[in-house]
Image (cartoon, rainbow, N blue to C red):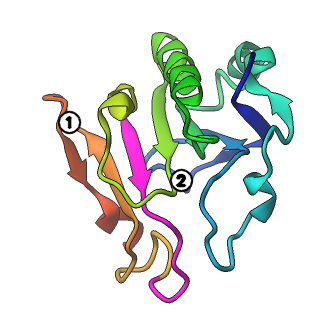
Amino acid sequence: MASIYYTEVDLSPYEVPNEQSLCIYISGCQQICQNCHYPDLRKTNYGEPLIDFFEKLLELYFYQATCVCFLGEGENTLQSRRELTIFAKQASKMGKKVCLYSGRDVEPENWMNVFDYVKVGSYQQFLGSLDSSSTNQVFYRKKADGIYENITYTFWL
């Protein structure tokens, strides 16, 4: 049974520096950020099962997107992590970079190592989002040696 549901997709040059991203909005967010920009993503099983549409989305946006960006990690269960890992590996095999936007206040976790980019940190309005130098959110890029480096500053330029 699918645990990752998505509500919509979009192409964006903003979520990942120097990439044109196919952004996939994942529902089931466990965070309760004040003034969240997309509160409907808190709903469980909201939207369509991503497993039913992921291959079609990759085909449809293959020539437009250089990166697949998962905006959310669902309910953050072992099953949702497994599904996201499978989707990320599938996109990587097709030559796409992969990114995960997590709203949790954590460092990149071991299971996230399949992603080329990881954004962590809850949205705290008084600190601002990634484009604010006072943000608590951190955007990481995985280097060739597999270590993540903080490149949040690239959003401030």
Residue 75 horizontal/vertical position (percent) = 63, 42
Which residue in the structure is indicated by mark 1? 143
- Horizontal placement of 58 versus 128: left or right? right
Q: Amino acid at mark 1?
A: Lys
Q: CA distance from mark 2 to mark 1?
A: 18 Å
Q: Toward which corner of the image does residue 9 lie, by quadrant? A: top right
Residue 15's disc number = 2
Q: Secondary structure at mark 1?
A: loop
Quadrant for the N terminus, please: top right
Q: Secondary structure at mark 2?
A: loop
Residue 26 horizontal/vertical position (percent) = 69, 42
Q: Among all residues in the image, which is located at the extreme bottom?
A: 126
Query: Callout 2: 10 Å neighbours few (<14), some, many (20+)?
Result: many
Q: Amino acid at mark 2?
A: Glu
Give the magenta range: 116-127
- Horizontal placement of 147 versus 135: left or right? left
**Earlier residue among tags 2 and 1:** 2
Residue 96 horizontal/vertical position (percent) = 49, 23
Asked whether the viewer can see residue 17, the reply is: no
Q: Nearer the viewer, residue 23 or 41?
A: 41
**Relative height, residue 68 to residue 154 (above, below):** above
